[in-house]
Image: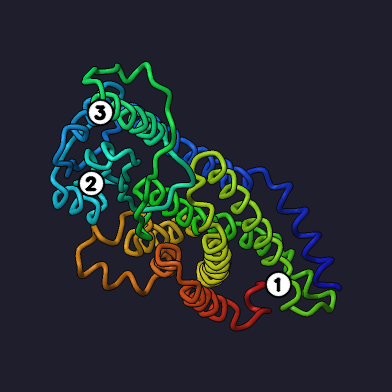
């Protein structure tokens, strides 16, 4: 009960620290929000839809021609766009089957195959347009067969078409950028935590608390526990806000992202404990923390994707918590989060070998 009471007291103190709130949440929210807006604007203004036309008849070409009136359409061979999809330079492409025309002429709705890197929760405007056009083509094919007259597609009513979607587990570039930024900002919270601990030491708050007969581990646990709750809740709120506003496709990954946020928060806390123990000069804390965080974020892949790093560096990245957190999210491996926790345990143990000396 005493621990819970001390956590509440420390949490109230942390919430009154406006600079901590600014650095921990406001700036990350502005940066991530800005990146999201820029990315969405770029997608809306310059989106190119890739299509593979395998149809041996006339209606495949007609579908593409009609779509080109409202969208930027580029036709390419399947092997070419599939290679782009594998290299993550392309988000998706649409494939018209060989029997597209024949299926329409038989009075049936043909299937459009969509190859993309992640599951979509619903039809996009482009796919709704495909629905409209195929339904109209289906009707005109029957009219032309019986009367030989051409009916304008714009005069017909739409129906639904069967669109089958093939997906992989890879996320698109924008989503990956968001996850990387989120993990990086979460770890950079350790700078504020480190200054917080240094301030408590310089004010001799921790040392006075120990003289009251309280267990040293209880005092330090309450301080770190309050900061853990503060950071984790704040970042999960930011995560949910981003998902519901910008990227609902990311919703199924929220549990594993939240778990890794907890683990990286534990790493950030442990790192702040370790650095505040070995760096006695408060003026040097920011410099040391920046060097550690920038270096590990770069090597660990949260600044630059692992795939773009030289092989020698990507091998070393496995000794960073960022690498395992990102791999856990990317591959859906919850067990990798335990490796991140192991980093936290090692740093915390090294930083609190003697709780009394830590308080001093």
Q: Are marks 1 and 3 in contact (CB under 8 Å)?
A: no
Q: Around disc 3, counting alpha carbons within 10 Å, would you say few (fewer than 14), some (14 to 19), or many (20 or more)?
A: few
Residue 210 vs 23, above or below: the answer is below
| Quadrant position of the C terminus in the picture | bottom right
| Label 1 packing within 10 angstroms: few (<14), some (14-19), many (20+) | some
In this rendering, is residue 82 above or below 152? below
Q: Position of residue 245 (x, y in %)?
A: 55, 39
Q: Which residue is mark 2?
A: 97
Colour mapping used in the image: rainbow
- Judge left or right: residue 268 versus residue 11: left
Task: Name the image quarter holding residue 295.
Answer: bottom left
Instruction: Compare residues 223 and 122 and report the one nearer the observer.
Output: 122
Which residue is depicted at the point 34% across and 53% down?
Answer: 117
Across and down, in percent, residue 96 comes to: 24, 43
Percent position of residue 79, x then y? 14, 52
The residue labelled by disc 1 is: 221
Residue 280 in sight here: no
Circle 2: is it few (<14), some (14-19), or many (20+) Cα within 10 Å? some
SS at badge 2: loop
Name the residue rendered at 21%, 32% in the picture: 59
As drawn, the label of residue 72 is 3
Tags 1 and 2 in contact by the CB under 8 Å rule?
A: no
Which percent across, then down, holds residue 229? 68, 60
Among the two numbered marks 1 and 3 on one chain, the one whose residue lies closer to the N terminus = 3
Dot 3 or dot 2: first in sequence order is: 3
User: Vertical placement of 78 versus 206: above or below?
Assistant: above
Which one is closest to the eye, mark 1 or mark 2?
Answer: 2
């Amino acid at each position: 009960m005493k621990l819970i009471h001390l956590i509440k007291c420390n949490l109230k103190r942390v919430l009154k620290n406006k600079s901590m709130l600014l650095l921990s949440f406001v700036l990350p929210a502005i940066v991530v929000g800005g990146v999201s807006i820029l990315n969405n604007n770029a997608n809306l203004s310059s989106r190119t839809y890739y299509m593979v036309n395998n149809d041996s008849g006339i209606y495949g070409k007609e579908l593409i021609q009609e779509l080109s009136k409202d969208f930027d359409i580029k036709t390419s061979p399947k092997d070419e766009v599939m290679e782009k999809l594998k290299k993550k330079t392309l988000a998706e492409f649409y494939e018209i089957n060989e029997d597209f025309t024949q299926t329409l002429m038989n009075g049936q709705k043909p299937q459009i195959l969509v190859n993309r890197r992640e599951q979509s929760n619903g039809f996009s405007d482009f796919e709704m347009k495909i629905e409209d056009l195929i339904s109209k083509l289906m009707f005109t094919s029957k009219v032309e067969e019986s009367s030989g007259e051409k009916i304008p597609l714009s005069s017909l009513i739409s129906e639904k078409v069967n669109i089958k979607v093939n997906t992989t587990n890879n996320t698109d570039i924008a989503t990956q950028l968001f996850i990387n930024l989120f993990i990086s900002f979460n770890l950079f919270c350790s700078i504020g935590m480190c200054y917080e601990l240094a301030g408590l030491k310089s004010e001799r708050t921790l040392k006075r608390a120990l003289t009251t007969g309280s267990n040293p581990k209880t005092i330090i646990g309450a301080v770190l526990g309050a900061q853990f709750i503060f950071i984790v809740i704040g970042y999960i709120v930011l995560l949910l806000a981003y998902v519901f506003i910008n990227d609902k496709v990311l919703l199924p990954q929220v549990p594993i992202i939240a778990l890794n946020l907890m683990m990286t928060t534990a790493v950030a806390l442990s790192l702040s404990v370790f650095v505040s123990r070995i760096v006695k000069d408060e003026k040097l804390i920011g410099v040391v923390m920046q060097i550690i965080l920038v270096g590990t974020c770069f090597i660990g892949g949260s600044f630059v994707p692992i795939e773009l790093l030289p092989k020698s560096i990507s091998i070393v990245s496995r000794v960073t918590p960022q690498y395992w957190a990102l791999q856990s999210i990317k591959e859906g491996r919850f067990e990798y989060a335990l490796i991140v926790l192991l980093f936290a345990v090692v740093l915390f143990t090294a930083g609190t070998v003697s709780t009394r000396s830590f308080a001093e």
